[in-house]
Amino acid sequence: MQYARLHVSAVLAAISLVLSPSAGLARELVFAADRWCPANCDPASDRPGYMVEIVKAVFEPLGHTVTYVELNWPRAKLYTLEGRFDGIFAAWPEGEPRFVYPQLSHGVSANGLFVHRDSDWTYEGPQSFQGQTAGLIVDYSYGEEFERAIQHYGRASYVAGDNALELNLNKLALNRLDLVVEDVNVFRYTAMSMGLNDRFRLAAAVEADDIYIAFSPQAPDAKTLAEELDTGMRRLRTSGELDRILARYGLADWQGAPDPLQTPAN
């Protein structure tokens, strides 16, 4: 009888371990974001974005399947907060504090101030925005003080939609905006894809911050997923796989010596 009790106890312990949320049950993980290359690009492309490749490289070996849904940013955030999706790409803790974040970052984002190549405008502090119209995107986080400075000294022109950045780049190319504020790498990647990379000049890069792959607070295993992602990132770095992923997008590892002025590869 003692053997039977020990046997049953061992079975129950094993079942408890399998069913425990901390064990990280394999399932479909759905991530949502608007297109923000090179972090996350066309889901159907052979280069879907380096963050997309990171989550696949980390979670698929654990038995999870990864799905990336392209959706405009406000809806991506809302639906993930509601629990319809498991995570989002390229989130910023100060700007999006309600998500569950890993400890390790997944990139560095610097606000680039881009102008037309013929412009002689330079940035020497918030007062430089005096008389300038800056192109921004609705519901993006640029930093409260930075965005307030634009609105105070100059004028903020907001656009929305799935092609918001492309709209701003076209306006800047036609001199309908004085400058566009966008992540340095994202702006350059998008301008290159539009064939406009020789039309603009980077006047300054400011407000550099770490960005993350973040998880829904409604997901019961969000903390576990964040821990698994941290463990996976350490493995990718040690094995050299992270460097190989980033190289496909013309980027280098930001840890230790982040360089927000990297230029994406063709």
Image (spheres, helix red, strand yellow):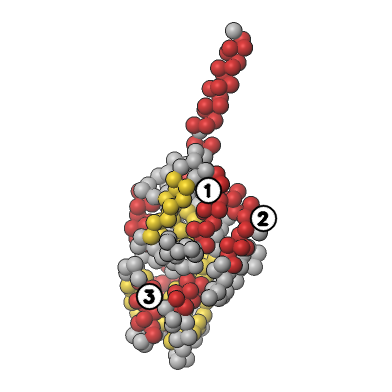
Please indicate, yes or no, whether residue 165 appears anywhere in the rendered image: yes
Q: Give the class, few, some or many, for how many residues have Cα within 10 Å of label 3's Cα (few <14, many ≥20).
A: some
- Which picture quadrant has residue 76? bottom left
Q: Residue at x 55, y 44 (%)?
A: 62
Please indicate, yes or no, whether residue 94 appears anywhere in the rendered image: no
Spatial CA span between label 3 and label 1:
33 Å
**Which dot, 3 or 2, sits closer to the camera?**
2
- Which picture quadrant has residue 44? bottom left
Which residue lies under the disc numbered 2? 239
Of all residues shown, which one is farthest toward the top? 1
Query: Which of pointers 3 and 2 lies earlier in the amino acid sequence?
Result: 3
Which residue lies under the disc numbered 1? 60
Query: Which of pointers 2 and 1 lies earlier in the amino acid sequence?
Result: 1
Contact between labelled residues 1 and 3, with CB atoms less than 8 Å apart: no
191 lies left or right of 248: left
Query: Is the residue 175 above or below the residue 194 in the image?
Result: below
Which residue lies under the disc numbered 3? 166
139 lies left or right of 200: left
Q: Residue at x 42, y 78 (%)?
A: 194
- Comparing 126 with 78, the one in front is 78
- Image quarter hosting the N terminus: top right
Please name the amino acid that badge 1 sits on. Answer: Glu
Please name the amino acid that badge 3 sits on. Answer: Glu
**Which dot, 3 or 1, sits closer to the camera?**
1
Q: Residue at x 54, y 68 (%)?
A: 249
Spatial CA span between label 2 and label 1:
16 Å
- Comparing 170 with 209, the one in front is 170
Of all residues shown, which one is farthest toward the right? 238
Q: How many marks?
A: 3
Query: Is the residue 20 above or below the residue 6 in the image?
Result: below
Q: Give the class, few, some or many, for how many residues have Cα within 10 Å of label 1's Cα (few <14, many ≥20).
A: some
